[in-house]
Amino acid sequence: MQKDKLYSFLFILPSIILIAIFVYFFIFWTGFISLTDWNDIFPSFNIVGLRNYIELFQNFRFQISMKNTLVFTALFLVSSLILGFLLAIFLDQKIRGENIFRNIYLFPMAISFVVTGVVWRWILNPGTINNPVGLNQILDKIGLSFLKSGWYTDPKIGIKAVVIAAVWQMSGYVMAMYLAGIRGIPSELFEAAQVDGANMWQVYRYIVLPLLRPITLGAIIILGHISLKIFDLVVAMTGSGAGFSCDVPALFMYDTTFRGNHFAQGASIAIILLLMVGVLIIPYLRYSLKSEVKR
Amino acid sequence: MAEVKLENVTKKFGDVIAVNNVSLDIKDKEFIVLVGPSGCGKTTTLRMIAGLEEITSGNIYIDGRIVNDVPPKDRDIAMVFQNYALYPHMTVYDNMAFGLKLRKYPKSEIDRRVKAAAEMLGIENLLKRKPKELSGGQRQRVALGRAIVREPKVFLMDEPLSNLDAKLRVQMRAELKKLQRTLGVTTIYVTHDQTEAMTMGDRIVVMKDGVVQQVDDPLTVYEKPNNVFVAGFIGSPPMNFIDATLSEDAKILDLGSFKLGIPSDMQSFVAEHAKNYLGKKVILGVRPEHIYEVALMKTEDLIPEAVADLKVEVLEPMGTEVYLYLINGPVSVVARVSAETRARMGENVKVMFDLRKMHLFDPVTQMAII
């Protein structure tokens, strides 16, 4: 028994050491940097307290990027969940060629955000009024030209255009989670509800959706942390956009740190991001650990 | 509350005929049990009545109305499922109230009905619990409660007791029967357990391979089975079947290794009813309780022509009675005798076959002759 414990400890030791150095130490290090005045190309470690944070919150670009990230997260989460759930219901109707549809819906997930970003940059490129391209051209051709828009080039839309690409990429994943969940519900429950007098909509509303709550929660956590940290998709698709209308904190952090050489300022953005993701993930971890202990 | 009628109902799954041309008239307030081995089509029949399975051909009537294309929710039926199918995220109260809420009953009426049903079932103290906090028997009651509160025209029950332990099953059997009497709701009950069928049903429907074999009250099914299948399925231990030859004069049954004399007062009856089988092969059916140990019999009851000497292969004490597994040449039978038996394993024992209660079946069609 003692020997077993020793061996198992030895086996996980390398990963513990590596994670300790490259994850936790660097989180700590970033936190430390954020409290210094290293806002130049040359390292400087004079502690300045929370000055970087105070300046950050007064920064116009940071305010916009925070607002953008909240809009992006809200729209991305809600749309992916609704679309994913509807696709799952659709696939659950025992339709023909279910496998084909499932693969089609799931496929975008296999693509890198960078590729998605580039492709959607082309699709949503508005072109000019006389020479529309991409989606605008299609809308023109099928007589829906009133739906034409400047998409991500329009500061009023900005980040919302990026949401379209992100939803396209991730809703299939939500669909797969929900479909597995729906398939895990015993068929008698559907039948009992039907006999009890529920129509299709009521079965999903009162039986399926409540039973899928753990899956919804899981999906919110996964999509939420992707969304808060989103970087590659925005860089590939739009950059920070007109008047920072597509800017997000991760992009701002990158620009500040590696283009502007304001390392301390960049570190403080990183810490804010960490806290935001933490708010989302820590309750979830506590919840799932607790239920694991219960089991 | 309602009659249920099945008219030439057939269900095919691809090429497989699950239910074949079933016709049934179920009377108002009747407790009817569909019984048969697994795969006999009894559950499919029930699901068709519920509307959970489309019918391939035929008609189903509930209360005189054809319901072939009516969805389950509009058939005014309630169903109890084998594994209860309680909604795990709802409390017991909400589980029972769900059907009424969907039908937009006023809150006070829902509350009244749920509480009344809970009281009837003795689960008032469980109303706030979730299904996972309940025992099997309690879940069973909630599932029943969910059906009762709806006050439907018909109860459909799909092996509702099969997940309970043996003791509770016997108890619930009686309670369920009593409940059905009290409520007076037409009930269609599916089981593979012939004891359940015998004890609960006003009438029982024995099915095999999608075909109805016999519809009768339990005693008739037991005493006058239509064919070898019904005779063997109903009764425990099952009826003994022995290949035999009936003599030309209807006096003797030749079982191969020994002969049995038919009692003189039976002979004319046999000669008349089995006139096409005189001198021919038949299947003799004798229930285990109709084979008596001679040593325990009163002499005046003894019919010496019907006595045979068989070897005791196995002896199973069941408490008040003993099952003797007897063998003599090709003949092997089970006898159900009193615990006072003097038979010993490996020894021979004299037994009398009570041919007044015998059954004869056609060896080809397997249909009952007597």
Image: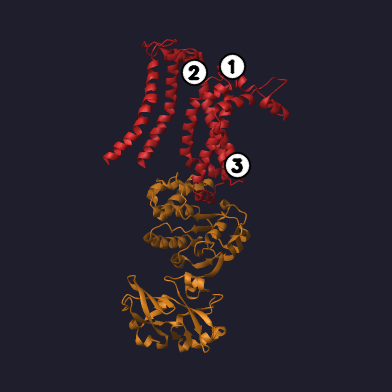
Which tag, 3 or 1, sits closer to the chain's start? Answer: 3
Q: Residues within 10 Å of mark 2 (few under 14, many from 20)?
A: some
Rendered position, A283 above or below B33: above
Would you say the residues marked 1 and 2 are in contact, meaning their CB atoms lie under 8 Å apart? no
Which tag, 1 or 2, sits closer to the chain's start? Answer: 1
Return the mark for residue A100.
3
What kind of element bears circle 1? helix
**Mark in front: 3 vs 1:** 3
- Judging from the image, mark 3 belongs to the subunit labelled A
In the figure, the shade used to draw chain B is orange
Which residue is label 2 attached to? A254
The residue closer to the viewer here, B358 or B366, is B366
Asked where in the image residue A32 lies, by quadrant, the reply is top left
What kind of element bears circle 2? helix
Q: Amino acid at mark 3?
A: Ile
Return the mark for residue A242.
1
Which chain is displayed in red in the rendered image? A
Which tag, 2 or 3, sits closer to the chain's start? Answer: 3
